[in-house]
Image (cartoon, rainbow, N blue to C red):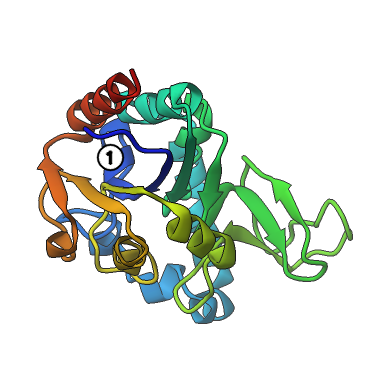
Amino acid sequence: MARYHNIVILTGAGLSAESGLSTFRDKGGIWAKYDYRDVATPEGFRANPALVHDFYNQRRRDHADVHPNAAHIALARLEREHRGSVDIITQNIDALHEAAGSQNLIHMHGELLKALCTHCGERNAWTGDMNLDTRCPNCGRSGGMRPDVVWFGEMPYEMERIYMLLAAADLFISIGTSGNVYPAAGFVAEARSAGAHTLELNLEPSEGATLFHEARYGAATKIVPAVVDELLAARN
């Protein structure tokens, strides 16, 4: 593994699967059990807010029982010990990166453990249940609280900053992503066009696998710590 200075890492649901969180598009995943249009779109929320709140309330309850795995911990170690910059862009709405110790983190699809008030626009940490009667801690109004997650049809967060990081990267690593959800699926092309070496770490080839210079396949808890070891060894 060569020496790199600016490392940008994209993580997806496959990274957290070994912690016990369901993926979305795999057989038996979340979208095999729910129609995303009902629980993950603004239109679905307007049509049946109680259903959407129930869906995310359950996901918050499930989150209380999961912990970071060896891959999350390895990425946090890379951030601490690498002599250059390490920035993680995650599609995941869970808080496992933070629990492992990562700090340079962008939640492009929002955060499960935060609530957004559509009345005043304020965000708050949120671990309990939420419903239509829930009052905003800031403005005091009810009926406007929703999970602070990016639904289908909404713009992901911090896109300008993300593209700046991709343009400056000399190594781009994609971990546990399907490669079929944009704009994240286009990040490898952005990084590669800016001159970065691109590496895919996944259970199996993603839809964009041919865009990567290099790939390694297997369980995230095995291959991610191995790559981190190589990167940190290469600094010496």
**Front residue (pair 186, 50):** 186
Observer able to see residue 82: yes
Q: Is residue 25 left or right of residue 67?
A: left
Residue appearing at x 36%, y 70% in the figure: 36
**Front residue (pair 191, 174):** 191
Please give the residue where the numbered disc 1 appears in the rendered image.
17
Residue appearing at x 73%, y 70% in the figure: 118
Residue appearing at x 58%, y 79% in the figure: 46
Residue 57 locus on image (x, y percent): 53, 49
Amino acid found under the numbered disc labelled 1 = Ala
Observer able to see residue 68: no
Look at the image and tell me in which quarter the N terminus lies. top left
Residue 184 locus on image (x, y percent): 37, 64
Q: Is residue 22 left or right of residue 106?
A: left
Total residue callouts: 1
Residue 48 locus on image (x, y percent): 53, 74
Q: Quadrant of residue 144?
A: bottom right
Element type where label 1 sits in the image: helix
**Front residue (pair 211, 158):** 211
Residue appearing at x 21%, y 25% in the figure: 226
Residue at the limit of the structure toward the right, as seen here:
139
Reply above or below: 131 against 21: below
Look at the image and tell me in which quarter the C terminus lies. top left
Residue 231 locus on image (x, y percent): 30, 28
Reply above or below: 159 against 233: below
Q: Label 1 neighbourhood size at 10 Å, few (<14), some (14-19), many (20+)?
A: some
